[in-house]
Amino acid sequence: MAFYNTRAIVLGAANWREADRLITLFSRDRGKIRAAAYGCRRPRSRLASVSQLFGVVDVQLTEGQQLNTIKNCDHNGFLADFSNDYIALAYASFIAEFVAEIFEEGQPQAEVYDELLKIIPSMRQKNPRVVALAAFFQILEFTGSQPQYESCVRCGKKINGDAYFSFEEGGAVCKKCGHDTLIILYPQSVRTLILKLRKLEWHNMCSFSIQAKDLVAAENIMLKYLELILGKQLKSLVFIKQITQ
């Protein structure tokens, strides 16, 4: 039985059986890890801290054919304190679920891990709605599923001015090529916003104004594209809707 040690971020926890939990971790050297924490719901369990969302933990695990097992855990604090900010928690949960769904297990994702160390604390420092949108577009770059924002997916020419967006084809469609009903409007102002969010620096987040209509349009692109590549809607979106309404 092979043991290994890693430092990871807790992205999710679900109750399992009478006293256990299934934990989703994200490690710099191993990427996503799904593991069982047996007995962690019992009083005074040494594994109790491993199920605390957005905790940073040093864990020892054993490898299994279908599921790893957490044997020991040392807690190293949280990426952010969301105890009094449920809106920030809701958007942070969205990013956590997105990362947990989009990446396969056992694939090293050092850059994504480093991004999460910056993104999650930023939820408390800036507008979490904008942070979540920027985080989505930036993390998408590491998946191989990112759409084309600046060139037409049909003719390859650089987009100028207003255009269209095709989810099925994976990106922008210029006005010359956009003659069907399977695409949506893709204004220049929305494209400018997306490009700005993709380059947003987490350690130096300068303030900038965003038109409400552009924010909503960029979110619609995010949500529709996300549902297309995952084939389902994320549960955290229901949490966001409940909290914000």
Image (cartoon, grey):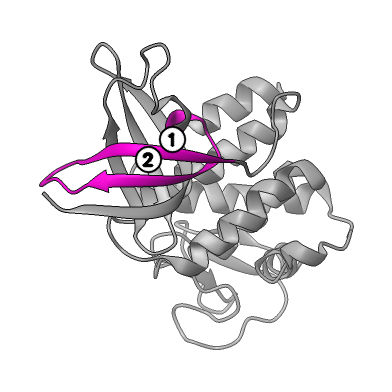
Residue at screen point 57% across, 53% down: 221
The answer to whether residue 17 is above or below residue 21 is above
Disc sitting over residue 128 in the figure: none
Kindly identify the amino acid type of the residue bearing the numbered disc 1. Answer: Gly
Q: Nearer the viewer, residue 90 or 48?
A: 48
- Asked if disc 2 and disc 1 are in contact, CB closer than 8 Å, the reply is yes
Residue at screen point 47% across, 57% down: 181
Kindly identify the amino acid type of the residue bearing the numbered disc 2. Answer: Thr
Disc 1 designates what residue?
A: 12
Disc 2 designates what residue?
A: 24
Viewer can see residue 216: no
Residue at screen point 19% across, 41% down: 67
Q: Reply yes or no: does residue 153 show up in magenta.
A: no
Q: How many C-alpha atoms fall within 10 Å of the one at disc 2: few (<14), some, or many (≥20)? A: many
The answer to whether residue 131 is above or below residue 149 is above
Viewer can see residue 82: yes
115 horizontally vs 108: left or right: right
Q: How many C-alpha atoms fall within 10 Å of the one at disc 1: few (<14), some, or many (≥20)? A: many
Residue at screen point 37% across, 16% down: 41
Name the dominant secondary structure of the magenta segment. strand
Region of the chain picked out in magenta, as a range: 50-76
Which numbered disc, 2 or 1, marks the residue that appears first in the sequence? 1
Q: CA distance from mark 2 to mark 1?
A: 5 Å
The answer to whether residue 170 is above or below residue 156 is above
Quadrant assignment, res 136 = bottom right
135 horizontally vs 104: left or right: right
